[in-house]
Image (spheres, rainbow, N blue to C red):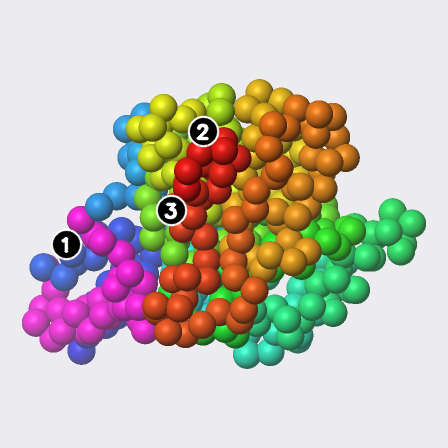
């Protein structure tokens, strides 16, 4: 009995101490006590799921200083953890964000660190928990509301727009609503028409919303922190395929103080002959296209827009004045979309006088996303299509 009691005390100690202390206790405990300790070491369901998603042979970032390779998933996780540590009014709510560590493991470990009052699992009821998050924001808290996919946010679009985005204006500027809506947006692979839509143009058209669409790990971390701190309603559009992509993160970006201002584009690659502008995963296609064009002595400038609204129009105008040509690349539908807005902004600015060719748009197809892989591959931008569009602006064979 004494040994069992000792084991129980060790179990309590294990819950609040490092694994090294627990291992020492395990080695010195009697056999029946060691059995209890062994049972206690079995991960919970959510922990097991998270462990399957992690390569324990790699580190997300180095503590020794200098750049490190970090996945977009881990960058988002770092941003939320740092902001929750910094501000106790920040909390995360959504389907499977707690015990399961998030559908895409973006919230891995946050429940263990911050507890179930700040990392909250919800039923499958988007309108309900979205309204709860908006209400919490109106009461002074800073919720992060995760949608398993922004396609599901259509169930809650009234809460996002009418209850969230319009309140600050309708209250005469007296009632801020600091809530961050985040989750994967656009197509992944083989998920069909109802799970593949790009909502950047939808939300970008709404006054009162700030809309962010990051590409790299630095984008994801710096802009997520900016979104959480911003007093407005922010829609943070992630990409499912990018979650597992690794990008180099500078030592500065690994700091808890690293924040990227909302509304500032980034020149990913300087060029002089044509401007390629995109957001999210389309930046990757633009960069790949620029590499191909460079082999033909065509210098392409690549702009990572990062923010849909407010759009960094001055950065686009400045680039067009230098290159005299532009290709806008996004995965949304062609009508009333991202590329259309860029074309209109150029028409309304003095950059129009610098154009040597019409604005080219590379978009998704005017069709619900096909499920068949052969058709799906033809429904969205590719590197080759971007290359052809760039050559068209240069009046070269394509």
Q: Badges 1 and 2: C-beta atoms under 8 Å apart?
A: no
- Judged from the image, the secondary structure of the residue bearing numbered disc 3 is helix
In the displayed structure image, the side of residue 309 where residue 3 appears, left or right: left
Q: Residue 231: image x %, image y %?
A: 72, 46
The residue positioned 86% from the left and 51% from the top of the image is 169
Residue 189 lies in what quarter of the image?
bottom left
Mark 1 neighbour class, 10 Å CA radius: few under 14, some 14 to 19, many 20 or more:
few
- Judged from the image, the secondary structure of the residue bearing numbered disc 2 is strand
Q: Residue 298: image x %, image y %?
A: 40, 26
Look at mark 1 in the image and give the residue it sits on.
24
Look at mark 3 in the image and give the residue it sits on.
384
Cα separation between marks 1 and 2: 59 Å
Q: Which mark is residue 130?
A: none
The residue positioned 34% from the left and 56% from the top of the image is 16
In the displayed structure image, the side of residue 248 where residue 185 appears, left or right: right
Mark 2 neighbour class, 10 Å CA radius: few under 14, some 14 to 19, many 20 or more:
many
Cα separation between marks 3 and 1: 59 Å
Q: Is residue 97 something that shows in the picture?
A: yes
**Magenta stretch bounds:** 28-57
Q: Earlier in the sequence, mark 3 or mark 2?
A: 2
Residue 143 lies in what quarter of the image?
bottom right
Q: Earlier in the sequence, mark 1 or mark 2?
A: 1
Whether residue 34 appears in magenta in the rendering, the answer is: yes
- Judged from the image, the secondary structure of the residue bearing numbered disc 1 is helix
């Amino acid at each position: 009995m004494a040994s069992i009691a000792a084991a129980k005390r060790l179990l309590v100690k294990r819950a609040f101490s490092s694994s090294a202390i627990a291992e020492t206790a395990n080695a010195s405990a009697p056999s029946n006590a060691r059995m209890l300790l062994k049972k206690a070491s079995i991960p919970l369901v959510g922990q097991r799921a998270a462990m399957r998603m992690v390569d324990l042979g790699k580190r997300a970032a180095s503590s020794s200083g200098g750049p490190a390779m970090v996945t977009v998933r881990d960058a988002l996780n770092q941003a939320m953890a740092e902001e929750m540590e910094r501000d106790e009014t920040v909390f995360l709510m959504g389907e499977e964000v707690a015990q399961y560590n998030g559908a895409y493991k973006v919230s891995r470990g946050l429940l263990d660190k911050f507890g179930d009052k700040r990392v909250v699992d919800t039923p499958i009821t988007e309108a309900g928990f979205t309204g709860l998050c908006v209400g919490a924001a109106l009461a002074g808290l800073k919720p992060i509301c995760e949608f398993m996919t922004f396609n599901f946010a259509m169930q809650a679009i009234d809460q996002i727009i009418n209850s969230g985005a319009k309140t600050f204006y309708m209250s005469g500027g007296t009632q801020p609503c600091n809530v961050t809506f985040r989750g994967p947006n656009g197509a992944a692979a083989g998920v069909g028409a109802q799970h593949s839509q790009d909502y950047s143009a939808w939300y970008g058209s709404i006054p009162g919303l700030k809309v962010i669409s990051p590409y790299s790990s630095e984008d994801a971390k710096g802009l997520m922190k900016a979104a959480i701190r911003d007093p407005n309603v922010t829609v943070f559009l992630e990409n499912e395929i990018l979650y597992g992509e690794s990008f180099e993160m500078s030592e500065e970006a690994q700091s808890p103080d690293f924040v990227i201002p909302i509304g500032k584009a980034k020149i990913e690659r300087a060029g002089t002959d044509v401007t390629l502008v995109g957001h999210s995963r389309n930046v990757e296609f633009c960069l790949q296209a620029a590499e191909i064009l460079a082999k033909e002595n065509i210098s392409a400038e690549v702009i990572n827009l990062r923010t849909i609204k407010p759009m960094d129009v001055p950065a686009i105008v400045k680039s067009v004045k230098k290159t005299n040509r532009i290709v806008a690349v996004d995965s949304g539908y062609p009508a009333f979309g991202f590329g259309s807005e860029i074309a209109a902004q150029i028409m309304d600015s003095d950059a129009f006088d610098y154009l040597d060719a019409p604005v080219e748009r590379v978009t998704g197809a005017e069709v619900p996303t096909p499920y068949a892989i052969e058709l799906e591959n033809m429904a969205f931008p590719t590197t080759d299509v971007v290359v052809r569009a760039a050559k068209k602006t240069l009046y070269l064979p394509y």
